[in-house]
Amino acid sequence: MTATDKSSPKKKDAKDNTFRRKQRPLEDFSQVLRDADVCENPLAAYAPKPAGLKFESQAETERVVMLLRRHPITNIRWVLTAIILSLAPQILQFVPFLDFFPDQYQMFTLLGWYMLIFAYSLENFLSWFFQVNIITDERIIDIDFYSLIFKKVSSAKLDNVEDITSSTGGFLRSLLNYGTVIVQTAATQQEFEFIDVPQPDQVIKLLNELLLEEEQEKLEGRAY
Amino acid sequence: MDLIQLLDQLVQMISNPSVDISFGWMVLGWMYTLGFFIYVMFAVMVIRQIQMMSQTFTTPLRGVLLGFALGHLLVAISIFALSFISLI
Protein backbone atom coordinates (compact mmCIF):
# COMPACT_ATOMS: atom_id res chain seq x y z
CA MET A 1 0.00 0.00 0.00
CA THR A 2 1.17 3.45 -0.76
CA ALA A 3 1.21 6.28 1.73
CA THR A 4 -1.76 7.78 -0.03
CA ASP A 5 -3.75 4.54 0.29
CA LYS A 6 -2.97 4.31 3.98
CA SER A 7 -4.12 7.83 4.65
CA SER A 8 -7.32 7.83 2.54
CA PRO A 9 -9.44 5.65 4.90
CA LYS A 10 -8.45 7.95 7.78
CA LYS A 11 -9.32 11.03 5.73
CA LYS A 12 -12.68 9.49 4.85
CA ASP A 13 -13.35 8.70 8.52
CA ALA A 14 -12.31 12.20 9.51
CA LYS A 15 -14.71 13.71 7.00
CA ASP A 16 -17.62 11.54 8.18
CA ASN A 17 -16.99 11.40 11.89
CA THR A 18 -15.25 14.58 12.91
CA PHE A 19 -18.35 16.11 14.38
CA ARG A 20 -20.32 12.94 14.89
CA ARG A 21 -20.29 11.64 18.38
CA LYS A 22 -20.06 7.90 18.74
CA GLN A 23 -22.92 7.08 21.03
CA ARG A 24 -23.68 3.83 22.69
CA PRO A 25 -27.30 2.76 22.97
CA LEU A 26 -28.67 3.98 26.28
CA GLU A 27 -29.57 0.50 27.45
CA ASP A 28 -25.94 -0.58 27.10
CA PHE A 29 -24.76 1.46 30.03
CA SER A 30 -27.90 2.13 32.05
CA GLN A 31 -29.71 -0.55 33.99
CA VAL A 32 -32.49 1.91 34.85
CA LEU A 33 -33.28 2.36 31.17
CA ARG A 34 -32.79 -1.30 30.42
CA ASP A 35 -35.48 -2.17 32.94
CA ALA A 36 -37.86 0.53 31.72
CA ASP A 37 -40.11 0.57 28.68
CA VAL A 38 -40.74 3.59 26.49
CA CYS A 39 -43.20 5.79 28.34
CA GLU A 40 -46.12 6.83 26.17
CA ASN A 41 -48.22 8.38 28.91
CA PRO A 42 -48.01 12.19 28.44
CA LEU A 43 -49.26 12.74 31.99
CA ALA A 44 -46.67 10.54 33.66
CA ALA A 45 -44.62 12.07 36.45
CA TYR A 46 -41.81 9.52 36.04
CA ALA A 47 -41.24 8.95 32.35
CA PRO A 48 -38.13 7.08 31.27
CA LYS A 49 -37.58 7.29 27.52
CA PRO A 50 -40.60 9.53 26.96
CA ALA A 51 -42.16 9.14 23.55
CA GLY A 52 -42.65 12.19 21.36
CA LEU A 53 -40.85 14.60 23.64
CA LYS A 54 -38.61 17.34 22.27
CA PHE A 55 -37.45 20.57 23.82
CA GLU A 56 -36.30 23.93 22.54
CA SER A 57 -32.54 23.75 22.91
CA GLN A 58 -32.20 20.05 22.16
CA ALA A 59 -29.17 19.22 20.05
CA GLU A 60 -29.49 16.96 17.03
CA THR A 61 -27.68 14.05 18.66
CA GLU A 62 -29.01 14.67 22.15
CA ARG A 63 -31.34 11.99 23.48
CA VAL A 64 -33.99 12.60 26.09
CA VAL A 65 -33.54 9.97 28.74
CA MET A 66 -36.12 10.90 31.35
CA LEU A 67 -38.88 13.37 32.07
CA LEU A 68 -39.80 14.11 35.65
CA ARG A 69 -42.65 16.02 37.24
CA ARG A 70 -43.90 16.35 40.77
CA HIS A 71 -45.73 13.25 41.99
CA PRO A 72 -49.47 13.45 41.17
CA ILE A 73 -50.31 13.25 44.87
CA THR A 74 -48.90 16.77 45.27
CA ASN A 75 -51.98 17.98 43.40
CA ILE A 76 -54.34 16.69 46.05
CA ARG A 77 -54.53 20.03 47.82
CA TRP A 78 -55.90 22.03 44.92
CA VAL A 79 -58.09 19.15 43.74
CA LEU A 80 -59.77 18.90 47.14
CA THR A 81 -60.08 22.67 47.33
CA ALA A 82 -61.77 22.77 43.93
CA ILE A 83 -64.16 19.96 44.90
CA ILE A 84 -65.13 21.65 48.16
CA LEU A 85 -65.62 25.00 46.46
CA SER A 86 -67.76 23.32 43.80
CA LEU A 87 -69.99 21.88 46.47
CA ALA A 88 -70.28 25.19 48.32
CA PRO A 89 -73.35 26.46 46.38
CA GLN A 90 -75.17 23.19 47.17
CA ILE A 91 -74.44 23.60 50.85
CA LEU A 92 -75.14 27.32 50.94
CA GLN A 93 -78.57 26.94 49.32
CA PHE A 94 -79.82 26.14 52.81
CA VAL A 95 -78.65 29.58 53.86
CA PRO A 96 -80.52 32.57 52.34
CA PHE A 97 -77.33 34.10 51.09
CA LEU A 98 -78.22 35.73 47.78
CA ASP A 99 -82.01 35.56 47.92
CA PHE A 100 -82.33 39.34 47.53
CA PHE A 101 -80.61 39.11 44.10
CA PRO A 102 -82.87 38.85 41.06
CA ASP A 103 -82.84 35.42 39.42
CA GLN A 104 -80.56 36.34 36.53
CA TYR A 105 -78.00 37.86 38.89
CA GLN A 106 -78.06 34.71 40.98
CA MET A 107 -77.45 32.69 37.84
CA PHE A 108 -74.50 34.83 36.79
CA THR A 109 -73.11 34.75 40.32
CA LEU A 110 -73.20 30.98 40.19
CA LEU A 111 -71.64 30.97 36.71
CA GLY A 112 -68.91 33.32 37.83
CA TRP A 113 -68.25 31.14 40.89
CA TYR A 114 -67.78 27.99 38.80
CA MET A 115 -65.68 29.86 36.26
CA LEU A 116 -63.34 31.00 39.03
CA ILE A 117 -63.04 27.44 40.33
CA PHE A 118 -62.32 26.23 36.81
CA ALA A 119 -59.68 28.92 36.31
CA TYR A 120 -58.05 27.96 39.63
CA SER A 121 -58.01 24.27 38.68
CA LEU A 122 -56.77 24.88 35.15
CA GLU A 123 -53.94 27.10 36.33
CA ASN A 124 -52.84 24.54 38.91
CA PHE A 125 -52.98 21.73 36.38
CA LEU A 126 -50.93 23.67 33.81
CA SER A 127 -48.44 24.60 36.49
CA TRP A 128 -48.01 20.93 37.41
CA PHE A 129 -47.93 19.76 33.80
CA PHE A 130 -45.36 22.22 32.50
CA GLN A 131 -42.98 22.30 35.47
CA VAL A 132 -40.69 19.49 34.46
CA ASN A 133 -37.17 18.26 34.83
CA ILE A 134 -35.60 16.70 31.77
CA ILE A 135 -32.54 14.48 31.83
CA THR A 136 -30.76 13.88 28.55
CA ASP A 137 -27.56 12.01 27.82
CA GLU A 138 -25.78 15.39 27.82
CA ARG A 139 -27.56 17.70 30.26
CA ILE A 140 -30.10 18.17 32.97
CA ILE A 141 -32.78 20.78 32.31
CA ASP A 142 -35.08 22.38 34.85
CA ILE A 143 -38.15 24.15 33.50
CA ASP A 144 -39.99 26.24 36.06
CA PHE A 145 -43.25 27.92 35.37
CA TYR A 146 -44.05 30.58 37.93
CA SER A 147 -47.14 32.32 36.61
CA LEU A 148 -49.13 32.77 33.44
CA ILE A 149 -46.36 34.59 31.63
CA PHE A 150 -43.14 33.81 33.45
CA LYS A 151 -40.94 30.80 32.86
CA LYS A 152 -37.40 29.91 33.81
CA VAL A 153 -35.32 27.34 31.99
CA SER A 154 -32.03 26.23 33.51
CA SER A 155 -29.67 23.62 32.16
CA ALA A 156 -26.34 22.17 33.14
CA LYS A 157 -24.09 19.74 31.36
CA LEU A 158 -23.57 16.43 33.06
CA ASP A 159 -19.83 17.18 33.05
CA ASN A 160 -20.51 19.96 35.56
CA VAL A 161 -22.44 17.81 38.00
CA GLU A 162 -20.51 17.55 41.22
CA ASP A 163 -22.86 16.06 43.76
CA ILE A 164 -26.25 14.34 43.80
CA THR A 165 -28.40 14.07 46.92
CA SER A 166 -31.86 12.67 47.47
CA SER A 167 -34.18 13.19 50.40
CA THR A 168 -37.40 11.38 51.20
CA GLY A 169 -39.08 12.38 54.44
CA GLY A 170 -42.52 11.95 55.87
CA PHE A 171 -45.21 9.32 55.87
CA LEU A 172 -46.72 10.09 52.48
CA ARG A 173 -43.36 10.39 50.73
CA SER A 174 -42.16 7.10 52.17
CA LEU A 175 -45.42 5.37 51.35
CA LEU A 176 -45.63 6.60 47.77
CA ASN A 177 -41.87 6.66 47.15
CA TYR A 178 -41.35 10.22 46.07
CA GLY A 179 -38.88 12.82 47.24
CA THR A 180 -36.48 15.58 46.26
CA VAL A 181 -33.29 15.11 44.30
CA ILE A 182 -30.74 17.91 44.61
CA VAL A 183 -27.98 18.16 42.03
CA GLN A 184 -24.99 20.37 42.78
CA THR A 185 -23.26 21.66 39.69
CA ALA A 186 -20.41 23.91 38.70
CA ALA A 187 -22.71 25.76 36.32
CA THR A 188 -24.17 29.25 36.74
CA GLN A 189 -27.08 27.80 38.62
CA GLN A 190 -25.32 25.81 41.28
CA GLU A 191 -28.23 23.77 42.51
CA PHE A 192 -30.93 21.95 40.61
CA GLU A 193 -33.83 20.66 42.61
CA PHE A 194 -36.10 17.95 41.33
CA ILE A 195 -38.86 18.54 43.85
CA ASP A 196 -41.20 15.70 44.87
CA VAL A 197 -40.32 13.44 41.96
CA PRO A 198 -41.27 9.75 41.99
CA GLN A 199 -38.61 7.12 42.58
CA PRO A 200 -35.77 9.44 43.56
CA ASP A 201 -33.44 6.49 44.08
CA GLN A 202 -33.85 5.48 40.45
CA VAL A 203 -33.23 9.07 39.36
CA ILE A 204 -29.97 9.14 41.30
CA LYS A 205 -28.97 5.78 39.88
CA LEU A 206 -29.66 7.00 36.36
CA LEU A 207 -27.69 10.20 36.88
CA ASN A 208 -24.75 8.23 38.21
CA GLU A 209 -24.89 5.92 35.20
CA LEU A 210 -24.94 8.91 32.86
CA LEU A 211 -22.01 10.50 34.68
CA LEU A 212 -20.01 7.30 34.37
CA GLU A 213 -20.81 7.13 30.69
CA GLU A 214 -19.63 10.73 30.24
CA GLU A 215 -16.34 9.82 31.91
CA GLN A 216 -16.03 6.74 29.75
CA GLU A 217 -16.64 8.80 26.61
CA LYS A 218 -13.87 11.19 27.55
CA LEU A 219 -11.45 8.36 28.22
CA GLU A 220 -12.28 6.62 24.97
CA GLY A 221 -12.23 9.86 22.99
CA ARG A 222 -15.87 9.50 21.97
CA ALA A 223 -16.91 12.86 23.39
CA TYR A 224 -16.91 16.17 21.50
CA MET B 1 -72.58 61.25 40.90
CA ASP B 2 -69.41 60.66 42.89
CA LEU B 3 -68.19 57.47 44.48
CA ILE B 4 -69.53 58.19 47.94
CA GLN B 5 -73.03 58.82 46.63
CA LEU B 6 -72.81 55.64 44.57
CA LEU B 7 -71.75 53.57 47.57
CA ASP B 8 -74.47 55.16 49.66
CA GLN B 9 -77.07 54.18 47.09
CA LEU B 10 -75.72 50.62 46.99
CA VAL B 11 -75.94 50.32 50.78
CA GLN B 12 -79.51 51.66 50.71
CA MET B 13 -80.35 49.16 47.98
CA ILE B 14 -79.16 46.27 50.14
CA SER B 15 -80.60 47.44 53.44
CA ASN B 16 -83.92 48.84 52.17
CA PRO B 17 -85.38 47.02 49.16
CA SER B 18 -88.18 49.56 48.77
CA VAL B 19 -85.65 52.15 47.57
CA ASP B 20 -85.38 52.50 43.79
CA ILE B 21 -82.58 50.08 43.08
CA SER B 22 -82.51 50.03 39.30
CA PHE B 23 -79.36 52.14 39.17
CA GLY B 24 -77.67 49.89 41.71
CA TRP B 25 -78.46 46.78 39.75
CA MET B 26 -77.18 48.43 36.61
CA VAL B 27 -73.89 49.16 38.31
CA LEU B 28 -73.75 45.59 39.55
CA GLY B 29 -74.49 44.38 36.03
CA TRP B 30 -71.56 46.42 34.70
CA MET B 31 -69.32 44.98 37.41
CA TYR B 32 -70.34 41.45 36.49
CA THR B 33 -69.73 42.15 32.81
CA LEU B 34 -66.35 43.66 33.56
CA GLY B 35 -65.47 40.60 35.62
CA PHE B 36 -66.42 38.27 32.79
CA PHE B 37 -64.38 40.40 30.40
CA ILE B 38 -61.35 40.04 32.66
CA TYR B 39 -61.98 36.30 32.64
CA VAL B 40 -61.93 36.35 28.81
CA MET B 41 -58.51 38.00 28.99
CA PHE B 42 -57.40 35.30 31.40
CA ALA B 43 -58.59 32.64 28.93
CA VAL B 44 -56.51 34.29 26.17
CA MET B 45 -53.49 34.33 28.48
CA VAL B 46 -53.95 30.62 29.15
CA ILE B 47 -53.76 29.90 25.42
CA ARG B 48 -50.63 32.05 25.17
CA GLN B 49 -49.19 30.24 28.17
CA ILE B 50 -49.76 26.82 26.59
CA GLN B 51 -48.23 28.02 23.31
CA MET B 52 -45.20 29.44 25.08
CA MET B 53 -44.60 26.34 27.16
CA SER B 54 -45.15 24.08 24.17
CA GLN B 55 -42.36 25.94 22.41
CA THR B 56 -40.13 25.15 25.38
CA PHE B 57 -40.92 21.47 25.23
CA THR B 58 -43.22 19.62 22.87
CA THR B 59 -45.43 16.85 24.16
CA PRO B 60 -48.03 14.68 22.41
CA LEU B 61 -50.68 16.34 24.60
CA ARG B 62 -50.07 19.79 23.11
CA GLY B 63 -52.92 19.62 20.61
CA VAL B 64 -55.38 18.41 23.23
CA LEU B 65 -54.42 21.18 25.65
CA LEU B 66 -54.70 23.86 22.97
CA GLY B 67 -58.09 22.57 21.87
CA PHE B 68 -59.24 22.53 25.47
CA ALA B 69 -58.00 26.08 26.00
CA LEU B 70 -59.75 27.29 22.85
CA GLY B 71 -63.00 25.70 24.00
CA HIS B 72 -62.53 27.40 27.34
CA LEU B 73 -62.06 30.73 25.59
CA LEU B 74 -65.23 30.23 23.56
CA VAL B 75 -67.20 29.50 26.70
CA ALA B 76 -65.76 32.58 28.39
CA ILE B 77 -66.68 34.79 25.43
CA SER B 78 -70.20 33.33 25.34
CA ILE B 79 -70.75 34.01 29.02
CA PHE B 80 -69.37 37.53 28.64
CA ALA B 81 -71.72 38.19 25.73
CA LEU B 82 -74.66 36.73 27.63
CA SER B 83 -73.94 38.88 30.67
CA PHE B 84 -73.60 41.96 28.46
CA ILE B 85 -76.99 41.28 26.88
CA SER B 86 -78.80 40.20 30.03
CA LEU B 87 -77.47 42.49 32.67
CA ILE B 88 -76.91 45.76 30.87
Image: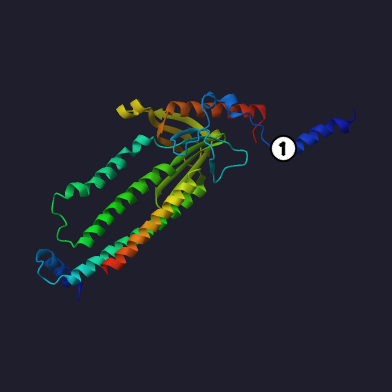
Query: Measuring 29% from the left and 45% from the top, which residue is drawn there?
Result: A82
Q: Quadrant of the N terminus of chain B?
A: bottom left
- B71 vs B24: above or below: above
Q: Is residue A104 left or right of residue A18?
A: left
In the depicted view, which residue is nearer to us: A175 or A18? A175
- A96 vs A216: above or below: below
Q: Is residue A191 left or right of residue A80?
A: right
Residue, disc 1 = A18
Query: Measuring 13% from the left and 51% from the top, which residue is drawn there?
Result: A95
- A61 vs B80: above or below: above
In the depicted view, which residue is nearer to us: A66 or A215? A66
Task: Find residue B81 and report its image quarter.
Answer: bottom left
Crowd rating for badge 1 (residues with CA inside 10 Å; few <14, some 14–19, many 20+): few
Task: Find residue B32 and report its image quarter.
Answer: bottom left
Asked if residue A170 shows in the view, the reply is no
Q: Is residue A37 left or right of residue A60?
A: left
Dot 1: what SS?
Answer: loop
Q: Position of residue A172 (x, y in %)?
A: 32, 29
Give the residue type that dot 1 points to: Thr
Asked if residue B44 shows in the view, the reply is yes
Q: Is residue B1 left or right of residue A39?
A: left
Q: Position of residue A202 (x, y in %)?
A: 46, 26
In the depicted view, which residue is nearer to us: A208 or B28? B28
Using the image, name the chain to which the residue with label 1 belongs.
Answer: A
Q: Position of residue A83 (x, y in %)?
A: 27, 43
Query: Measuring 16% from the left and 72% from the top, which residue is drawn there?
Result: B5
